[in-house]
Each structure stands twice: as C-alpha cells, then as structure tokens.
Image (cartoon, helix red, strand yellow):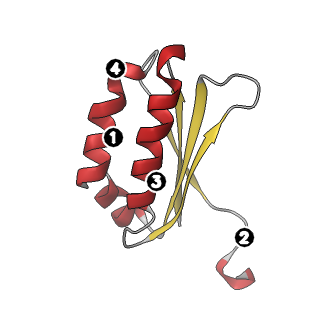
Amino acid sequence: MIVTCVYVEVKQEFIQDFIKECCINHQHSMNEAGNLRFDVLQDASDPTKFMLYEAYQNEEFSSAHKQTVHYLNWRKNVEHMMVKPRIGVKHQIICPTEIEK
C-alpha cells in the first residue's frame, strides 16, 4: 500500500470553491481501481490549510490516478486558488500490516 499526503494552503476567498472541487475529485477517486481511501481534511485551527490523504494498493494505481480526467481537471481548476504550490509526501504503511486485516 502507498499513501500520499498532499498539503495545500488556499487563498481565503477560494475556500468554498476549493472544497467543492476536492469533493468532486474525491467522489471520482473513490471509484478508481486500487483506491483504498481518499480523504479531504481541513485544518481545525486554520481553514485555509488542507490535507488530502490518498491511499492506493500500490504505486501503479497511485500513478494512474494522476492520469485521470477528474484529477487533471481538479489540478487545473484549483491551481489559482493556492497560496503556493501543493506539497505531496509519499509514505509507506508500517501498521496495520496485511496480517492484521
């Protein structure tokens, strides 16, 4: 399993538009082959900060996500809403293990 946490800071005036675009991307991403989770999180203390938590079965499914129409539309539609470019950090899962599931 591969997890990517994407950190985004959004301009105040675009918060609701950003959420709308992320929810569309979320809905489509959840239907992708190999998708395990796709969470859109908003910082409880700073509403301009978001984290997208993306979990895929493997790197191939994660890479395929970045080629989908809904992802490309999301990227194009939200780019101007960001204070600075988004940061994606890939993680490997330590726990839970496959044995625990």
Res 5 → quadrant: top right
Q: Amino acid at mark 1?
A: Trp
- In this rendering, does residue 22 appear at all? yes
User: Regarding mark 3 in the picture, which secondary structure is present there?
Assistant: helix
Mark 1 → mark 3, Cα distance in angstroms:
10 Å
CB of mark 1 within 8 Å of CB of mark 3?
A: no
Q: Is residue 68 left or right of residue 92?
A: left
Disc 4 designates what residue? 80
Residue 96 is tagged as: 2
Mark 3 → mark 2, Cα distance in angstroms:
23 Å
Mark 2 → mark 4, Cα distance in angstroms:
37 Å
CB of mark 1 within 8 Å of CB of mark 4?
A: no
Q: Earlier in the sequence, mark 1 or mark 3?
A: 3
Report x, y in % for residue 18.
46, 32
Q: Neighbour class for label 4 at 10 Å: few (<14), some, many (≥20)?
A: few
Q: Amino acid at mark 2?
A: Pro
Report x, y in % for residue 32.
37, 68
